[in-house]
Amino acid sequence: MENYNRLVARCNKIARLGQLAGLAGWDQQTYMPPGAAEARGEQLAVISELIHEMTVADETSQLISSAEAEIAGMDSDSDEVRSLRVVRRGHELATKIPGHLVAEASRHQSVAMPLWAQARAESDYSKFAPALEKSIELARQVAEHLGYKDHIYDALIDQYEIGATRADVAKMYADLTPHLVSLTAAIRDAKPNDDSVLMGNFPIDRQQSVTLDIVKSLGYDLNRGRQDIAAHPFCSGFSRDDVRITTRFNSEFLQQALYASLHEAGHAMYEQGIPASLNGLPISNAASLGIHESQSRLWENQVGRSRAFANWAFPTLQAAFPESLGNSNAEAYYKAVNVVRPSYIRVEADEVTYNLHVALRFELECALLSGELSVKDVPSAWNARMEKFLGITPPNDSLGVLQDVHWSIGLIGYFPTYSIGNIVSAQLWNAASREIPDLCRLVETGQFSPLLYWLNTNVHAHGCKFLPSEIVLKATGEPLNPAYYVNYLNTKYGELYGL
Ligand code: ZN
């Protein structure tokens, strides 16, 4: 096992470098003085270059081959076999794409992102279209180098959600979209619910302490984490013992910071929950973006937007903000955090409409990559789908096709991971509810540890030893099944809107 051990040690070194880069990136978005941007960019570039060099080096490649020979014949579910599979995949992803293409893509991103930002600010798609054309062309080249069996999209999505294919995702949306469209339409025709209870005066210092108290109650370990402020909420882990979250505060709208904190704490508890026994092994990472998002969504929505949670959290919130919440109650709060309103912007969308925004992007990406849709026709294709799915047409491209940063920074094939996360969250919640007696009552009384323990055992414990599809199967007893998400939404919103 000498070569295997040497390989693991080498991978561990590479991982440590990545963690330090992550720490520098966290600082960049939280406390770094603005004047340091250029120097930080150079520092991070040096680390990425080092990581890439070490990953593709002949030494790594030789160690992989000799380690594979050493472990031949071992159980295919052993840590050793699974670790080597993870290392080989990382090595192949890094070596299949030629250096000049990586450099070209990186140069393109630094040009395309400001063009996108300008186009969005001016709501002028023509300023972004040439950059998008190039992004699509580069994505096509990357996909050809990575290789795929059926559809060019397969190569791209596999980078973010290992094992997922265009056909899987198309089937997922075929199962999901018609239900979401009809539920959205039914809610649009129903008597609207009121969310005015969430608007008022919510001093930021009190929001800071109350959000932190709440995520601590859920099980976010502040001895191995902290919460800071950033323009865009995120979670960043530099080992299982240092997983940090950020949120953003709006003194007139309570929902924003609290639900960003719940979401990011869900991500953080996943990384904190990966067992110490996997430390230093290549399988000690999260399984995929979709599985990561299932954890954030589960705590944000299945827990945080439940009536049980409202009953538990409202008295704390009321005590913190007596001026604004003094005359309200838990039921009004529950209705308010679950208001459904078709809207133009994905990141502000409610649970019912959110995945329609993502389905739209998936369809357009596939059509762009296969050449069925040309870049100049994207805004009209976007608006037509918004009308079909949500019954609204964006008044301009800033509120439509130009809203997301993803396509300017080469993230094509990424969006469906958000929907996968939502679907997995409902499936996991269903399985947890079967196995934990009285789960809702536990949430209502602030006892979150049985749920966290269940997630620790059934999801977090695996790291990335298994494929995302294997984790879903092990944890829930069946493959990814959108029916749980559809049932969850139909039941909850049917009752909320009297459908
Ligand atoms: Zn997330």
Image (tube, rainbow, N blue to C red):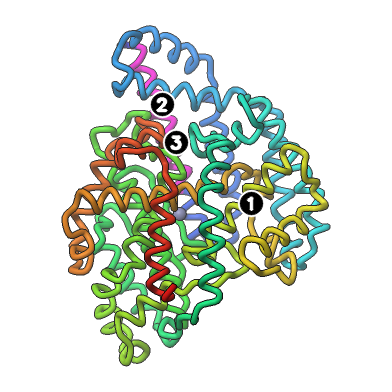
Q: Position of residue 487 (x, y in %)?
A: 39, 57
Q: Position of residue 114 (x, y in %)?
A: 72, 56
Q: Residues within 10 Å of mark 3 (few under 14, many from 20)?
A: some
Residues in magenta? 3-23
Mark 2–mark 1 CB contact (< 8 Å): no
Which of the two labelled residues, at mark 2 and mark 3, occupies the earlier sequence position? 2
Return the residue found at the far front: 499
**Nearest-to-viewer mark from 1 and 3:** 1
Which of the two labelled residues, at mark 1 and mark 3, occupies the earlier sequence position? 3
Residue at 31% from the left image edge and 89% from the top image edge? 322
- Magenta segment, prevailing SS (helix, strand or loop): helix
Q: Residues within 10 Å of mark 1 (few under 14, many from 20)?
A: many
User: Which quarter of the rendered picture does the C terminus lie within?
Assistant: bottom left
355 versus 238 height, above or below: below
- The residue wearing badge 1 is 361
- The residue wearing badge 3 is 17
Residue 137 located within the stretch drawn in magenta: no
For numbered disc 2, what is the local secondary structure?
Answer: helix
Residue 10 located within the stretch drawn in magenta: yes
464 versus 214 height, above or below: above
Quarter of the picture for ligand 1? bottom left
**Nearest-to-viewer mark from 2 and 1:** 1
For numbered disc 3, what is the local secondary structure?
Answer: helix
Indicate yes or no: mark 1 CB to ligand 1 under 8 Å.
Answer: no
In this rendering, position of residue 111 left or right of residue 360: right
The residue type indicated by label 1 comes to: Arg
Where residue 309 sits, quadrant-wise, is bottom left
- The residue wearing badge 2 is 11
Mark 1–mark 3 CB contact (< 8 Å): no
The residue type indicated by label 2 comes to: Cys
